[in-house]
């Protein structure tokens, strides 16, 4: 198969490399620097598996049929499948997702390749693919939700929790194309045993072929559940901290119930990252005219948590003359270089709104300042300058300044 992938970010690049094990893949991006790096066998993002796939391709250990390009004609012409993995952002003004990069990709794809199957991997509003198919009178548009985590993008595609592809259920050709695409994703997965797809989906990698609108809802409801869980354990932690209780003991006891489980329960400053903030807001927007209380509470809980964290930091420095708060890392997670929409950013804004001086240590950034606060490149100098060090996630780098740390990372994981 000839496969084109629009967008070489976390989603596009991991799928492109997965599929390039068995298919001819052309990855298109509008940023020439990313394309140049990829064609030199270097990853533009921090991801262990992506880096090792590219290295193995360069040294011949794992030959991949992969080429990056900025030329839409090269990528899209005669492609059997075109995967769209371009950014979609929540637009606060319009109260809706900005899907313009998906629409401009579809226009470009159709000018070179009128019949290829388009699979949208970008996150989109519920009902978007169906309205696009109607509007463009184009039946070859499918949607497949992506469940990867940043920092583990290719790993999660090699070991997928499930493969979901949405196709209009009354169109046999679309359903067949959805099965074919699902098989291609499973074929590229690492676990050979799991490559078997059973018709009832009971063994191997669970594979669901559903309606496109249901597939879109699966993505937004999954992420909103994850946000709910983060917000729940964070509010538990807010309660414990306010009442002087040991949150770790409470969470351990709560999580021993197998219906609750002992994962994804480590408190933080708030849910963040590229997806959860925008996907929860999008789902809330999709609830227009549908009764709900919980979805808007999840969104509101996250802001309340970040305000609480800022107030807790302020309490701890009260009394010090002109204190400096040091922010250890802007990233959400250990092992990631990405800090889009990270929770710490709102904590910084809240601190600065109270007139508190803030400095930042973020070794993946070359910038001099962020949100108007100075970035300190030298860790020892940063530690020395900070009266309190605020860390969303613990690191052994902080062992020697333990007494200065404010974190809610109780279990030192996630
Ligand atoms: N990052 C995640 O964890 C994750 C997980 C699941 C779903 N998603 C969704 O997948 C989509 C992409 O996310 P991402 O994290 O990979 O984004 P990203 O910002 O890392 O990458 C997007 C890439 O698309 C390129 N691009 C923009 N417009 C383009 C165009 N017209 N043609 C070709 N390339 C173009 C950009 O230069 C960039 O390299 C979003 O809708 C996101 O919500 C992301």
Image (cartoon, rainbow, N blue to C red):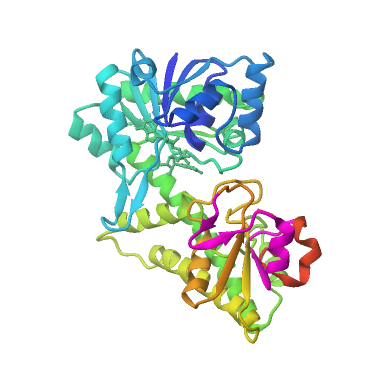
Residue occupying image coordinates x 30% and y 64%: 291
Residue occupying image coordinates x 38% and y 65%: 296
Query: Residue 4: x, y in percent?
Result: 41, 21
Of 38 and 115, nearer the camera is 38
Q: Is residue 34 magenta?
A: no
Question: Left or right: 137 with respect to 62?
Answer: left
Residue farthest to the bottom, as pictured = 319
Dividing the image into four equal quarters, which quarter contains ligand 1?
top left
Q: Quadrant of the N terminus?
A: top left
Query: Residue 249: x, y in percent?
Result: 73, 71
Of 64 and 329, nearer the camera is 329
Q: Which residues are the magenta region?
A: 367-395
Question: Left or right: 386 with respect to 171?
Answer: right
Query: Residue 284: x, y in percent?
Result: 35, 58
Q: Is residue 368 magenta?
A: yes
Q: Can residue 256 be seen in this view?
A: no
Above or below, 278 against 301 in this view is: above
The image quadrant that residue 55 belongs to is: top right
Of 21 and 50, nearer the camera is 50
Above or below, 103 against 361 in this view is: above
The image quadrant that residue 235 belongs to is: bottom right
Q: Is residue 306 visible?
A: yes
């Amino acid at each position: 198969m000839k496969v084109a992938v629009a967008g070489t970010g976390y989603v596009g690049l991991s799928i492109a490399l997965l599929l390039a094990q068995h298919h001819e893949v052309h990855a298109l991006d509008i940023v020439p620097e990313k394309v140049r790096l990829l064609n030199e066998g270097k990853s533009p993002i921090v991801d262990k598996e992506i880096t090792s796939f590219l290295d193995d391709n360069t040294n011949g250990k794992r030959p991949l049929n992969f080429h990056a390009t900025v030329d839409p004609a090269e990528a899209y012409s005669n492609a059997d499948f075109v995967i769209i993995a371009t950014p979609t952002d929540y637009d606060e003004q319009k109260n809706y997702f900005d899907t313009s990069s998906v629409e401009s990709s579809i226009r470009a794809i159709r000018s070179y390749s009128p019949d290829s199957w388009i699979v949208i991997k970008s996150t989109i509003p519920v009902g978007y693919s169906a309205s696009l198919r109607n509007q463009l009178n184009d039946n070859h548009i499918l949607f497949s939700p992506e469940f990867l985590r940043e920092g583990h993008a290719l790993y999660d595609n090699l070991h997928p929790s499930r493969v979901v592809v949405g196709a209009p259920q009354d169109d046999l050709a679309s359903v067949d194309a959805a099965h074919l695409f699902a098989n291609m994703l499973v074929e590229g997965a690492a676990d050979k045993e799991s490559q078997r797809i059973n018709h009832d989906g009971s063994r191997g990698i669970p594979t669901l072929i559903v309606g496109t609108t249901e597939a879109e809802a699966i993505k937004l409801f999954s992420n909103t559940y994850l946000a709910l869980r983060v917000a729940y354990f964070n509010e538990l932690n807010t309660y414990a901290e306010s009442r002087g209780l040991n949150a770790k003991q409470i969470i351990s006891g709560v999580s021993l119930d197998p219906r609750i489980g002992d994962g994804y329960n480590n408190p933080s400053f708030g849910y963040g990252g590229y997806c959860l903030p925008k996907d929860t807001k999008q789902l809330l927007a999709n609830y227009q005219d549908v009764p709900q209380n919980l979805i808007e509470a999840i969104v509101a809980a996250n802001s309340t948590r970040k305000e609480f964290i800022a107030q807790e930091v302020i309490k701890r420095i009260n009394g010090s003359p002109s204190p400096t708060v040091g922010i250890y890392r802007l990233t959400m997670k250990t092992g990631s270089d990405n800090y889009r929409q990270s929770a710490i950013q709102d904590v910084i804004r809240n601190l600065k709104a109270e007139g508190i001086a803030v400095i930042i240590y973020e070794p993946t950034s070359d910038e001099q300042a962020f949100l108007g606060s100075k970035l300190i490149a030298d860790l020892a100098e940063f530690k020395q300058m900070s009266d309190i060090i605020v860390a969303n996630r613990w690191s052994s780098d902080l062992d020697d300044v333990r007494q200065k740390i404010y974190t809610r990372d109780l279990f030192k994981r996630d």
